Image (spheres, rainbow, N blue to C red):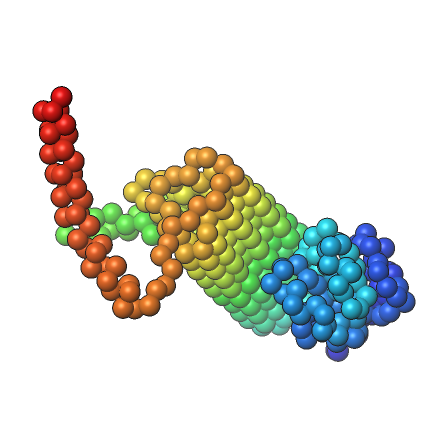
């Protein structure tokens, strides 16, 4: 069934989201787009000064922006203290993707002793194991597998081909994108003289309310206790979270990050893309820490509310090769400097 396209007047949008309207309140908006590409019935936003160059030529129906940019806007605008946040809220009105309808697809396989709540949508070829508990208004997409004793609180949405291992527990309104695997075994192995032996991974994974897990991300089950994500944790695509990691409330982790086992990450932390967290000891990262993309964290961060970075941006290959030669000789150079300093100290002492 096609979805009816919604239209909203600027005056209604301004009142609903407590924004200041500058312009024609009767104008109708039926969608969103970028500042550069938006048409006369579409809404856009300006949050980053980099894109201000596109403002004079915009053809948008209206622009969400800060008060300082309103005078330069050639079209109607909605003034917001935080334009990106305001856009995020307004854009939900124009999400025309069809909602899943309640019901169970005939190809789904559901254990008879599992509980299915009210208004639940279960897609094709879903498998739900023994003693699972599915809350009200949950959506479980095609090909998704829940092993035994999993629980989903109300309003969870699992997209296609998600896998939940044994005993995984999700809070309210958790969203998990396609291909994510929650509760696979952690990397527990012990070396026995001439071979590896597997360490049983006896914990599971507990995820709090309002979390979002990106496509093809993996969160390993705990070795003994659970791997735990607090409330409102946001995980991007292709993130690896190892066993017994604990992540505090409201922390966000961008794509391609890897978090080693038993790391504890505080609340309100931000990890940029391709950050690696791991070391010999179990690391702790303090609340409100920001780690820049591409950084490697090899020791605990104990002071809260700080930004950290440690990476080498790409250089022309010839220049990098010269630097690499010098890096290889750095230890020898340090020894020579130490020798010179020792000789100078002896000479200074002798002169005294």
Horizontal side of residue 20 vs 251, given as left or right = right
Q: Position of residue 11 (x, y in %)?
A: 87, 61
The image quarter in which residue 97 lies = bottom right
The quadrant of the picture occupied by the C terminus is top left
Q: Is residue 339 above or below residue 108?
A: above
The quadrant of the picture occupied by the N terminus is bottom right
The image quarter in which residue 315 lies = bottom left
Horizontal side of residue 71 vs 27, given as left or right = left
Residue closest to the eye, 249 or 196: 249
Horizontal side of residue 6 vs 54, given as left or right = right
Q: Residue at x 76, y 54 (%)?
A: 67
Q: Residue at x 14, y 48 (%)?
A: 332
Q: Position of residue 319 (x, y in %)?
A: 28, 65
Q: Position of residue 182 (x, y in %)?
A: 48, 56
Residue 176: tell me if it is visible: yes
Q: Residue at x 49, y 40 (%)?
A: 306
Q: Position of residue 86 (x, y in %)?
A: 72, 56
> Farthest residue toward the right?
26
The image quarter in which residue 318 lies = bottom left
């Amino acid at each position: 069934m096609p979805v009816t396209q919604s239209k909203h007047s600027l005056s209604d949008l301004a009142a609903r989201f407590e924004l200041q309207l500058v312009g024609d309140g009767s104008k109708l908006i039926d969608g969103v787009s970028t500042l550069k590409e938006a048409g006369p019935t579409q809404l856009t936003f300006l949050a980053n000064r980099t894109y201000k160059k596109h403002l004079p030529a915009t053809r948008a129906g209206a622009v969400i922006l800060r008060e300082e940019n309103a005078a330069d806007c050639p079209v109607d605008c909605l003034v917001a203290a935080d334009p990106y946040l305001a856009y995020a809220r307004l854009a939900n009105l124009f999400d025309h993707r069809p909602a899943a309808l309640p019901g169970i697809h005939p190809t789904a396989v559901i254990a008879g002793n599992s509980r299915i709540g009210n208004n639940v949508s279960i897609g094709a070829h879903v498998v739900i194991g023994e003693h699972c508990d599915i809350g009200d208004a949950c959506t479980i997409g095609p090909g998704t597998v829940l092993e035994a004793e999993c629980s989903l609180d109300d309003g969870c949405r699992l997209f296609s081909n998600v896998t939940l291992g044994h005993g995984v527990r999700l809070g309210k309104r958790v969203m998990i994108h396609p291909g994510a695997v929650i509760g696979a075994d952690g990397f527990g192995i012990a070396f026995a003289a001439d071979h590896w032996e597997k360490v049983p991974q006896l914990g599971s994974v507990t995820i709090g309310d309002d979390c979002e897990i990106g496509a093809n991300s993996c969160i390993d089950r705990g070795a003994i206790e659970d791997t735990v994500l607090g409330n409102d944790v946001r995980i991007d695509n292709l993130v690896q979270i190892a066993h017994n990691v604990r992540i505090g409330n409201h922390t966000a982790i961008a794509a391609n990050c890897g978090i080693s086992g038993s790391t504890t990450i505080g609340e309100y932390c931000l990890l940029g893309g391709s950050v690696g967290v791991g070391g010999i000891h179990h690391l702790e990262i303090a609340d409100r820490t920001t780690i820049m993309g591409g950084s490697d964290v090899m020791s605990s961060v104990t002071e809260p509310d700080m930004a950290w970075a440690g990476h080498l941006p790409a250089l022309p290959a010839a220049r990098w090769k010269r630097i690499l030669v010098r890096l290889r000789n750095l230890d020898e150079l340090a020894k020579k400097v130490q020798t010179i300093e020792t000789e100078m100290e002896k000479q200074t002492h002798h002169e005294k």
